Amino acid sequence: MRFGVVVFPGSNCDADCYYVIKEVLAQEVYYVWHQETDLSPYDCVVLPGGFSYGDYLRCGAIARFSPVMESVRGFAAAGGLVIGICNGFQILAEAGLLPGALLRNTTLRFICRYVDLRVENTGTPWTNSVDRKVLRIPIAHNEGNFVADEETLDRLNREGRVLLRYSDPEGNITAEANPNGAAQNIAGIASENFNVLGLMPHPERCSEDILGHTDGLTIWRSVVNHFERGN
Amino acid sequence: MRVSVYITPKAGVLDPQGQAVLGSLHSLGYTEVADVRIGKYIVLELEGADPAQVEARVQEMCSRLLANPIIEDFRFEAGS
Amino acid sequence: MEAAKPVSELYADLGLTSSEFEDIKRVLGREPSAVELGMFSLMWSEHCSYKSSKEALKMLPTQGPWVLQGPGENAGIIDIGDGLAVAFKMESHNHPSAVEPYQGAATGIGGIVRDIFTMGARPIACLDPLRFGSLDKQRTRFLLGGVVAGIAGYGNCLGIPTVAGDLYFDACYDENPLINVMCVGIMPVRRIIKGAAATPGEAVILFRNRTGRDGIGGASVLASQEFDETSEAKRPSVQVGDPFTEKLLIEASLEMLDAGLLVGLSDLGAAGISCALSETAAKGGVGMAVHADRVPLREDMEPFEIMISESQERMLAVCEPAKAAAVIEICERWGLKATQIGEVIPGDKLEIYWKGEKVVDVPASSLADGPVYSRESARPQYLDRVAAADLSTVEHPSDLNDVLMRLVASPNLCSRHWVWEQYDHMVQLNTVVYPGSDAAVLRVKGTGKGLALSVDGNGRYCYLDPYTGAQIAVVEAARNVIASGAVPAAITNCLNFGNPERPDIFWQFIRAVEGMSDACRALDLPVVSGNVSFYNESFGEAIHPTPVIGMVGVLPDIEKRVGIGFQSQDDLIVLLGETLPELGGSEYLKVIHGLTEGRPPGVDLAKERAVQAVCREAIEQGFILSAHDCSEGGLAVTLIDSCWATGLGATLRVETDLAPAEWMFSESQSRFVVTLKKMDLPRLQEIARAQVGVPVEVLGWVGGKHLVINDWIAMHLEKSREAWRTALENILA
């Protein structure tokens, strides 16, 4: 399987995603410069975390106008797999490839720590290999407070497109378990056809034993599994 | 021509910064403050003087880039 | 240009002494121009020239076979094997942070990070030792919140994890907080580059941020206009950081170095372009001709302002003329503006032109070298008073559970997670041991190695005895690194003191450097970089002398790392080293009795070396299951830390002649608490026998949900942990 990791000016988790895909998943991976427009070589496009364009104006607001984003739109429309992690999620939301928006955390502080996430739907390209109810994956963001209008939230729920919610270790969805004020504890959502995923937690940060946790690997493995089954 | 753009959180969207400032004002004794909304103020210097055209262009700039219509409202006025 | 006053009257306004002005005239053989005077005033300032500290710093050991670059460059560099080198340095941003905490701290990170990638290294970690005033002051909370947010705002954006630091509160820092910042970078040995020009004809290229009037200090008296209604606009502005641009500078600079395009690379920090040009030229033994009017500006500026502006996120590259186009091309691809502003010339002169007219013509080394002073030094009188304190009369409270609870929830001992959870401490996927341990441990990708990083410095100890206090900073940082399984390799430092022109302050400084030097020699630790910050005062009173150490250790095999947390039921808890009745300068005295008195714990360097060797060897043999350095708060705090880390309790049966409070809260040096399986105890005893003076005392065993020490302490872990964990956020709420 061949991954393309998009590099925007200010991306800073690009190398981390690249490393995990190459060294841990042992898949093919290339960097895609934000001015490139040909995504045809890739089976999955990764929009990594970071501070694209310094997150100036609004997170993701400037990056969404990069030349590569027009191609990402076409790639996604054709059913291509796109995962946006943290800043990547913010960019996907700004670009309208996923509904809603990400506001400043209610704590008004950057938060970097492990959180527990209840997996809401395991029948997707991103979660098919998840074998447990709750994943433990770190977050690291200042703007992860997901908002959307009621109608959108209803629809996301109805269609099973909320894939991850902040929970306690037992999987209960509580206010205490919500680190950033996100509506309905939403941490990750998918597009209508489930081929686009946006999530605030960083699966690449917990995909190796030496880093303490490997729950992130279940998400990466799901993508590869989905791809291999389909081909 | 100078155009001032005001961007505010949409009514009904929680404004965590505004809430924090509200709490802080209350603790300083300014209890008459009922609500605080914090937004952005952007000053554009434009070339061209046709007011109708300027308005159309700025409208477009706001809805495409400067504001996110899901969470923000905007208004703008010409002149400094 | 015309100055408002002749230079013969201006120099004092610029902070130069009359003898320094005479020196400048002697060096030049004439009166300096106003621009030249402005440049000299900054380059010969304490901050840039180290004129008060230079002599004393020569005491520090700086050599070692693994040292690739000692002091004198932007950062020190050590060889860690496998063709890799580690660059690191610490510096202060105290005064800017006291004025504007967010931007002060942010630009501090920006500066230290530039020092690292300027050497060719990719920054992989930041560490931030912070000192603030009393937490009950509104101002302290404002400063703390702003500084932490500033470090987070800048460091997180760069994608450099902040992996460790420390945080102390004391009234002596009320008006003058200490914001020390350390950065560590890694690189292939072959990519090392120095800030030196080499050959006439080479191009001098300035890249990125446009220059504005940021941080122009006392030199604003040079403005040719009289003060009038426009003066406000001419006031120096607070430096504002732009981490996005810095991130692009890192990527572009490393790309240029990988492509072998550069001869020299330098960042623009204090004294701006004057400093970068004069040092680059002086180190290369060449001259430079630079056109100030080619420097891209943000606003209208006069030549002297351009020469001394401290606008952030600017770099100076020197390259062969044929490679200039490639350098500029890389900059453009990263969206960075690059401009050739001059070239390297024969001779040793720094020549600055303004619209074709030569406005500066000075030997580069005369700016870069600066004067050297031997300051007067005299032992401060307060030392007799504090040393004479009779601590044997202190009455220890009977409820020791309550004492321990108060200690662990006190500002200096409670959990710092409120701080470090605001820092991205995981990005780059190297952080194996998180903040909150003795030392952060990073893996070195592509090798089986690790790096252990720690900072340390206790101002209260140094106030009571600067010599011993500075020694403790070194030996404790070394113990932190050893307890995590690493071999200490080298240190950097940041020496924060009051006004060096005061003999009592200068005495503190000299004694601290002596202490640091002796400790470093005893432990074979070279000092490869560092920074001195003088004039730290609060309400006219100097801060406690606060030398801060940054330590880098290397784990030859990262799989042999050890954490602070107890591992399993029935493991033996063993104390390496000896607990003495040393409550002087302790947190116990401060928190429970409100005293900053006595003598700090003593340091016996031979004993220290021995206990470190034992701990190191035992970890190397692989049977040590947890290790924790004993420091502030004493043994009781060390033990409960290890309990909380993994949620396992401990039961201790202690026999001692000391009072219970002395045994539990003494901050005696040269101690580790380790755990191991019972069957491995003889191995540990055998290792200890090979050294002199390292007692091995079995204290008890791991297990249960409580920490129990004789009939002194019986503490429920979960409840006490919550008090410790939430103390800081509760105080700040």
Image: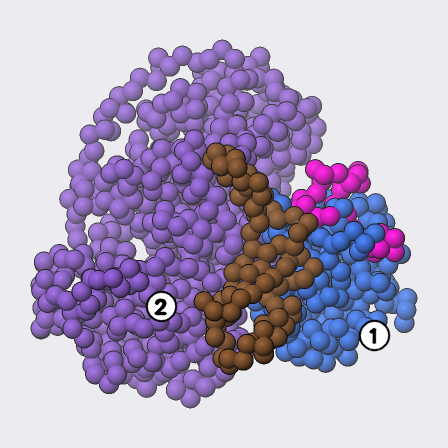
Q: Quadrant of residue C561?
A: top right
Chain with colour purple in the figure = C
**Span shown in magenta:** A155-183
Chain with colour blue in the figure = A
Residue extending farthest bottom: C322
Q: Quadrant of residue C343?
A: bottom left
Q: What is the three-letter code of the residue carrying label 1? A: Ala
In the image, what residue occupies the spot 53% across and 25% down? C636
Callout 2: helix, strand or loop? Answer: loop
Chain to which mark 2 belongs: C
Q: From where the camera sits, is residue A223 visible?
A: no
In the image, what residue occupies the spot 61% across and 17% down? C714
> Which of the two residues, C365 or C670, is positioned nearer the viewer here?
C365
Query: Circle 1 is placed at which residue position?
Result: A78
Callout 1: helix, strand or loop? Answer: loop
Query: Circle 2 is placed at which residue position?
Result: C212
Chain with colour brown in the figure = B
Residue C578: x %, y % from top left = 46, 26
Structural crowding at the residue carrying mark 1, measured as other residues with C-alpha within 10 Å and reported as few (<14), some (14–19) or many (≥20): few
Q: From where the camera sits, is residue C294 visible?
A: yes
Image marks 2 and 1: residues in contact by CB distance under 8 Å: no
Is C456 part of what is drawn in magenta? no
In the image, what residue occupies the spot 27% across and 48% down? C534
Secondary structure, magenta segment, majority class:
loop
Q: What is the three-letter code of the residue carrying label 2? A: Gly
Residue C39: x %, y % from top left = 23, 67
